[in-house]
Amino acid sequence: MRIAITGASGLLGTAVSVALRERGDTVTRMVRSRDAAAASDAIFWDPATGSLDAEGLTGHDAIVNLAGENIAGIWTDAKKKRIRNSRVGGTRLIAETLASMPRDRRPHVLVSASAVGYYGDRPPDQPLTEESPPGEGFMAEVVQDWEAAADPAREAGVRVVHLRFGPVLDRDALLLQATATATRLGLGATIGDGSQPFPWTTRDEVVRLVLFALDRPDLSGRINAAAPERTTNRSYADTLARVLGRPRVLRIPPFAVRLIGPLGQELLRGAWVVPAKLEAAGYAWLDPSLEPALRRLLRKP
Protein backbone atom coordinates (compact mmCIF):
# COMPACT_ATOMS: atom_id res chain seq x y z
CA MET A 1 0.00 0.00 0.00
CA ARG A 2 0.99 3.63 -0.48
CA ILE A 3 0.08 5.57 2.63
CA ALA A 4 0.36 9.29 3.35
CA ILE A 5 0.69 10.22 7.01
CA THR A 6 0.35 13.45 8.97
CA GLY A 7 2.17 13.85 12.27
CA ALA A 8 4.84 11.49 10.95
CA SER A 9 7.56 12.97 13.17
CA GLY A 10 5.56 12.68 16.41
CA LEU A 11 5.56 9.98 19.08
CA LEU A 12 2.81 7.99 17.35
CA GLY A 13 3.57 8.88 13.76
CA THR A 14 7.18 7.80 13.98
CA ALA A 15 6.24 4.36 15.27
CA VAL A 16 3.42 3.92 12.76
CA SER A 17 5.71 4.91 9.87
CA VAL A 18 8.35 2.40 10.93
CA ALA A 19 5.79 -0.40 11.21
CA LEU A 20 4.30 0.38 7.80
CA ARG A 21 7.70 0.37 6.11
CA GLU A 22 8.74 -2.84 7.87
CA ARG A 23 5.79 -4.67 6.39
CA GLY A 24 6.54 -3.36 2.90
CA ASP A 25 4.25 -0.33 2.59
CA THR A 26 5.40 2.94 1.04
CA VAL A 27 5.07 5.89 3.42
CA THR A 28 4.73 9.50 2.31
CA ARG A 29 5.17 12.18 4.97
CA MET A 30 2.78 15.13 4.84
CA VAL A 31 4.93 18.07 5.98
CA ARG A 32 4.43 21.79 6.56
CA SER A 33 7.80 22.93 5.27
CA ARG A 34 8.25 23.64 1.56
CA ASP A 35 11.89 22.64 1.84
CA ALA A 36 11.06 19.32 3.54
CA ALA A 37 8.37 18.67 0.93
CA ALA A 38 11.05 18.61 -1.75
CA ALA A 39 12.10 15.16 -0.51
CA SER A 40 10.95 12.19 -2.56
CA ASP A 41 8.97 10.74 0.37
CA ALA A 42 7.09 13.94 1.29
CA ILE A 43 4.28 16.21 0.12
CA PHE A 44 3.32 19.66 1.34
CA TRP A 45 0.31 20.60 3.39
CA ASP A 46 -0.48 23.53 5.68
CA PRO A 47 -3.84 23.49 7.50
CA ALA A 48 -3.32 27.07 8.67
CA THR A 49 -3.47 28.34 5.09
CA GLY A 50 -5.71 25.61 3.68
CA SER A 51 -2.96 24.28 1.40
CA LEU A 52 -2.55 20.63 0.45
CA ASP A 53 -0.79 19.12 -2.54
CA ALA A 54 -3.65 17.03 -3.91
CA GLU A 55 -1.59 15.95 -6.89
CA GLY A 56 0.94 14.48 -4.47
CA LEU A 57 -1.81 12.29 -2.98
CA THR A 58 -2.66 10.79 -6.34
CA GLY A 59 -2.01 7.05 -6.37
CA HIS A 60 -2.02 6.65 -2.62
CA ASP A 61 -4.25 4.04 -1.06
CA ALA A 62 -4.81 5.65 2.32
CA ILE A 63 -4.14 8.60 4.61
CA VAL A 64 -3.33 8.21 8.32
CA ASN A 65 -4.06 11.47 10.11
CA LEU A 66 -2.21 11.76 13.43
CA ALA A 67 -1.56 15.51 13.50
CA GLY A 68 -2.63 17.60 16.47
CA GLU A 69 -1.33 20.07 19.05
CA ASN A 70 -0.11 18.33 22.21
CA ILE A 71 -2.71 18.84 24.94
CA ALA A 72 -0.03 19.00 27.68
CA GLY A 73 0.59 22.44 29.11
CA ILE A 74 -1.43 25.36 30.43
CA TRP A 75 -4.72 25.72 28.56
CA THR A 76 -4.69 29.40 27.75
CA ASP A 77 -7.20 30.65 25.19
CA ALA A 78 -4.44 30.54 22.58
CA LYS A 79 -3.50 26.96 23.54
CA LYS A 80 -7.12 25.81 23.34
CA LYS A 81 -7.44 27.44 19.92
CA ARG A 82 -4.37 25.53 18.70
CA ILE A 83 -5.72 22.26 20.13
CA ARG A 84 -8.98 22.75 18.25
CA ASN A 85 -7.67 24.15 14.98
CA SER A 86 -4.86 21.62 14.60
CA ARG A 87 -7.39 18.80 14.77
CA VAL A 88 -10.53 20.21 13.20
CA GLY A 89 -8.92 22.37 10.53
CA GLY A 90 -6.40 19.75 9.45
CA THR A 91 -8.99 16.97 9.22
CA ARG A 92 -11.38 19.19 7.29
CA LEU A 93 -8.66 20.12 4.82
CA ILE A 94 -7.85 16.46 4.19
CA ALA A 95 -11.52 15.48 3.87
CA GLU A 96 -12.38 18.30 1.48
CA THR A 97 -9.30 17.54 -0.62
CA LEU A 98 -10.25 13.87 -0.88
CA ALA A 99 -13.82 14.78 -1.83
CA SER A 100 -12.54 17.03 -4.61
CA MET A 101 -10.28 14.41 -6.19
CA PRO A 102 -11.41 12.00 -8.92
CA ARG A 103 -12.61 8.78 -7.35
CA ASP A 104 -10.13 6.61 -9.25
CA ARG A 105 -7.13 8.73 -8.24
CA ARG A 106 -7.72 9.49 -4.58
CA PRO A 107 -6.93 7.48 -1.42
CA HIS A 108 -9.92 5.35 -0.52
CA VAL A 109 -9.30 5.13 3.24
CA LEU A 110 -8.81 7.80 5.90
CA VAL A 111 -7.76 6.57 9.34
CA SER A 112 -7.89 9.55 11.66
CA ALA A 113 -6.92 9.89 15.31
CA SER A 114 -9.68 10.87 17.72
CA ALA A 115 -10.04 10.77 21.50
CA VAL A 116 -12.07 9.29 24.34
CA GLY A 117 -12.55 12.89 25.47
CA TYR A 118 -15.70 12.64 23.34
CA TYR A 119 -17.49 11.11 26.34
CA GLY A 120 -16.68 13.88 28.80
CA ASP A 121 -17.19 13.10 32.48
CA ARG A 122 -19.36 10.07 33.23
CA PRO A 123 -20.16 7.97 36.32
CA PRO A 124 -17.35 5.43 36.84
CA ASP A 125 -19.78 2.49 36.67
CA GLN A 126 -21.35 3.54 33.34
CA PRO A 127 -19.91 1.60 30.37
CA LEU A 128 -19.74 3.59 27.15
CA THR A 129 -19.62 2.09 23.67
CA GLU A 130 -19.30 3.76 20.28
CA GLU A 131 -23.08 4.17 20.27
CA SER A 132 -23.11 6.27 23.47
CA PRO A 133 -23.88 9.99 23.14
CA PRO A 134 -21.22 12.67 23.60
CA GLY A 135 -20.46 14.28 26.92
CA GLU A 136 -19.89 17.91 27.81
CA GLY A 137 -16.79 20.05 28.16
CA PHE A 138 -14.05 21.47 25.97
CA MET A 139 -12.53 18.20 24.77
CA ALA A 140 -15.94 16.62 24.15
CA GLU A 141 -16.80 19.55 21.89
CA VAL A 142 -13.44 19.42 20.13
CA VAL A 143 -13.77 15.70 19.40
CA GLN A 144 -17.28 16.10 18.02
CA ASP A 145 -16.07 18.81 15.64
CA TRP A 146 -12.90 16.84 14.86
CA GLU A 147 -14.83 13.78 13.76
CA ALA A 148 -17.47 15.80 11.91
CA ALA A 149 -14.70 17.52 9.94
CA ALA A 150 -14.19 14.24 8.05
CA ASP A 151 -17.78 14.28 6.74
CA PRO A 152 -16.88 15.54 3.23
CA ALA A 153 -14.67 12.49 2.65
CA ARG A 154 -17.25 10.13 4.17
CA GLU A 155 -20.01 11.56 2.01
CA ALA A 156 -17.83 11.19 -1.09
CA GLY A 157 -17.48 7.45 -0.46
CA VAL A 158 -14.11 7.33 1.33
CA ARG A 159 -13.94 4.79 4.17
CA VAL A 160 -13.28 6.84 7.30
CA VAL A 161 -12.18 5.38 10.64
CA HIS A 162 -11.95 7.49 13.80
CA LEU A 163 -9.73 5.79 16.39
CA ARG A 164 -10.74 7.18 19.78
CA PHE A 165 -7.54 6.85 21.79
CA GLY A 166 -7.17 7.20 25.53
CA PRO A 167 -3.96 8.48 27.17
CA VAL A 168 -1.03 6.76 25.49
CA LEU A 169 1.54 4.98 27.66
CA ASP A 170 5.10 4.53 26.48
CA ARG A 171 8.55 4.83 27.99
CA ASP A 172 9.08 7.88 25.74
CA ALA A 173 5.70 9.47 26.51
CA LEU A 174 5.48 12.34 28.99
CA LEU A 175 2.59 10.80 30.96
CA LEU A 176 4.41 7.60 31.90
CA GLN A 177 7.75 9.37 32.36
CA ALA A 178 6.24 11.91 34.76
CA THR A 179 4.16 9.49 36.81
CA ALA A 180 6.91 6.86 37.00
CA THR A 181 9.46 9.46 38.12
CA ALA A 182 7.11 10.77 40.81
CA THR A 183 6.36 7.24 41.99
CA ARG A 184 10.05 6.30 42.20
CA LEU A 185 10.56 9.37 44.41
CA GLY A 186 7.74 8.27 46.70
CA LEU A 187 5.42 10.94 45.29
CA GLY A 188 2.98 8.68 43.47
CA ALA A 189 -0.53 10.04 43.93
CA THR A 190 -4.12 9.81 42.83
CA ILE A 191 -5.76 12.83 41.22
CA GLY A 192 -8.78 13.81 43.31
CA ASP A 193 -10.37 10.75 44.88
CA GLY A 194 -9.03 8.60 42.06
CA SER A 195 -12.41 7.11 41.15
CA GLN A 196 -12.50 8.65 37.66
CA PRO A 197 -12.03 6.07 34.88
CA PHE A 198 -8.68 6.02 33.11
CA PRO A 199 -9.09 4.62 29.57
CA TRP A 200 -5.53 4.03 28.38
CA THR A 201 -3.60 2.40 25.57
CA THR A 202 0.06 1.93 24.69
CA ARG A 203 2.02 3.29 21.75
CA ASP A 204 2.66 -0.24 20.50
CA GLU A 205 -1.08 -0.87 20.59
CA VAL A 206 -1.74 2.35 18.67
CA VAL A 207 0.52 1.09 15.89
CA ARG A 208 -1.32 -2.24 15.72
CA LEU A 209 -4.70 -0.51 15.78
CA VAL A 210 -3.81 1.79 12.89
CA LEU A 211 -2.66 -1.16 10.80
CA PHE A 212 -5.76 -3.12 11.77
CA ALA A 213 -8.00 -0.23 10.67
CA LEU A 214 -6.16 0.09 7.37
CA ASP A 215 -6.45 -3.61 6.60
CA ARG A 216 -10.07 -4.23 7.58
CA PRO A 217 -12.44 -2.89 4.89
CA ASP A 218 -15.41 -3.78 7.11
CA LEU A 219 -14.34 -1.26 9.77
CA SER A 220 -15.56 2.31 9.58
CA GLY A 221 -16.81 5.12 11.77
CA ARG A 222 -16.03 5.64 15.43
CA ILE A 223 -13.84 3.03 17.13
CA ASN A 224 -13.10 3.03 20.86
CA ALA A 225 -9.35 2.37 20.91
CA ALA A 226 -8.74 2.02 24.65
CA ALA A 227 -7.69 -1.17 26.41
CA PRO A 228 -10.55 -3.47 27.48
CA GLU A 229 -9.49 -3.63 31.14
CA ARG A 230 -11.52 -1.29 33.31
CA THR A 231 -9.06 1.08 35.01
CA THR A 232 -9.42 4.10 37.29
CA ASN A 233 -6.98 6.83 38.16
CA ARG A 234 -6.50 5.14 41.54
CA SER A 235 -5.84 1.71 40.07
CA TYR A 236 -3.35 3.23 37.62
CA ALA A 237 -1.45 4.94 40.45
CA ASP A 238 -1.53 1.81 42.63
CA THR A 239 -0.49 -0.53 39.80
CA LEU A 240 2.41 1.72 38.81
CA ALA A 241 3.54 1.82 42.44
CA ARG A 242 3.36 -1.96 42.68
CA VAL A 243 5.35 -2.43 39.45
CA LEU A 244 8.05 -0.04 40.70
CA GLY A 245 8.04 -1.44 44.23
CA ARG A 246 7.20 1.89 45.80
CA PRO A 247 4.34 3.05 48.07
CA ARG A 248 1.43 5.15 46.86
CA VAL A 249 0.07 7.14 49.77
CA LEU A 250 -0.51 10.62 48.36
CA ARG A 251 -3.67 12.20 47.02
CA ILE A 252 -3.85 15.49 45.17
CA PRO A 253 -7.06 17.19 46.32
CA PRO A 254 -9.46 18.44 43.64
CA PHE A 255 -8.97 22.13 44.51
CA ALA A 256 -5.23 21.80 43.87
CA VAL A 257 -5.79 20.09 40.52
CA ARG A 258 -8.21 22.84 39.48
CA LEU A 259 -5.48 25.43 40.05
CA ILE A 260 -3.92 24.17 36.81
CA GLY A 261 -6.90 25.63 34.98
CA PRO A 262 -9.06 23.95 32.31
CA LEU A 263 -6.60 21.06 31.89
CA GLY A 264 -6.85 20.38 35.62
CA GLN A 265 -10.61 20.15 35.31
CA GLU A 266 -10.18 17.62 32.51
CA LEU A 267 -7.86 15.54 34.73
CA LEU A 268 -10.69 15.16 37.22
CA ARG A 269 -12.95 13.80 34.51
CA GLY A 270 -13.14 10.31 33.09
CA ALA A 271 -15.28 7.77 31.29
CA TRP A 272 -15.37 3.97 31.25
CA VAL A 273 -14.80 3.34 27.55
CA VAL A 274 -15.60 -0.10 26.16
CA PRO A 275 -13.96 -1.11 22.82
CA ALA A 276 -17.10 -2.88 21.60
CA LYS A 277 -16.44 -2.62 17.86
CA LEU A 278 -12.89 -3.90 18.13
CA GLU A 279 -14.01 -6.84 20.25
CA ALA A 280 -16.73 -7.65 17.71
CA ALA A 281 -14.14 -7.48 14.90
CA GLY A 282 -11.95 -10.03 16.70
CA TYR A 283 -9.06 -7.70 17.42
CA ALA A 284 -6.31 -9.43 19.44
CA TRP A 285 -4.93 -7.04 22.03
CA LEU A 286 -1.22 -6.76 22.67
CA ASP A 287 -1.80 -4.92 25.96
CA PRO A 288 -5.26 -5.75 27.33
CA SER A 289 -4.26 -5.37 31.01
CA LEU A 290 -2.43 -2.55 32.74
CA GLU A 291 0.07 -4.32 34.99
CA PRO A 292 1.66 -6.53 32.30
CA ALA A 293 1.76 -3.51 29.99
CA LEU A 294 3.56 -1.37 32.57
CA ARG A 295 6.01 -4.18 33.37
CA ARG A 296 6.81 -4.53 29.67
CA LEU A 297 7.21 -0.80 29.12
CA LEU A 298 9.31 -0.31 32.25
CA ARG A 299 11.13 -3.63 31.73
CA LYS A 300 10.13 -4.97 35.12
CA PRO A 301 10.01 -8.80 35.58
Image (tube, rainbow, N blue to C red):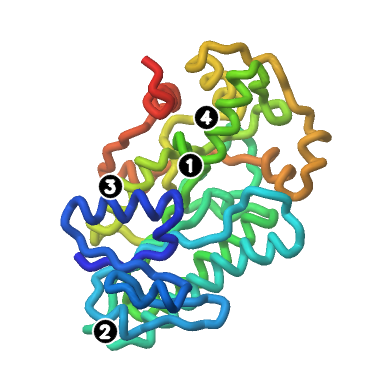
Q: Marks 2 and 1: CB-CB under 8 Å?
A: no
Q: Which callout, 4 or 1, points to the residue nearer the camera?
A: 1
Q: CA distance from mark 1 to mark 3?
A: 22 Å
Taking the spot 45% from the left edge, 37% from the top edge, the residue there is 170
Q: Residues within 10 Å of mark 2 (few under 14, many from 20)?
A: few
Question: Mark 1 highlights which residue?
Answer: 168
Taking the spot 55% from the left edge, 73% from the top edge, the residue there is 89
Q: Is residue 28 left or right of residue 130?
A: left
Question: Mark 4 highlights which residue?
Answer: 231
Instruction: Provide the secondary structure element on which disc 1 rests.
Output: strand
Q: CA distance from mark 2 to mark 3?
A: 28 Å
Of the residues under marks 2 and 4, which one precedes in the sequence? Answer: 2
Q: Marks 3 and 4: CB-CB under 8 Å?
A: no
Q: Which callout, 3 or 4, points to the residue nearer the camera?
A: 4
Of the residues under marks 2 and 1, which one precedes in the sequence? Answer: 2
* Residue furthest front as drawn: 35
- Looking at the picture, which amino acid does disc 4 mark? Thr
Instruction: Provide the secondary structure element on which disc 3 rests.
Output: loop
Please tell me whether residue 210 is drawn above or below residue 28 in the rendered image. Answer: above
- Looking at the picture, which amino acid does disc 2 mark? Arg
Q: CA distance from mark 3 to mark 4?
A: 22 Å
Q: Position of residue 20 (x, y in %)?
A: 25, 55
Q: Nearer the viewer, residue 68 or 159?
A: 68
Q: Marks 2 and 3: CB-CB under 8 Å?
A: no
Q: CA distance from mark 2 to mark 4?
A: 43 Å
Q: Is residue 221 visible?
A: no
Question: Mark 2 highlights which residue?
Answer: 103
Q: Is residue 110 left or right of residue 231?
A: left
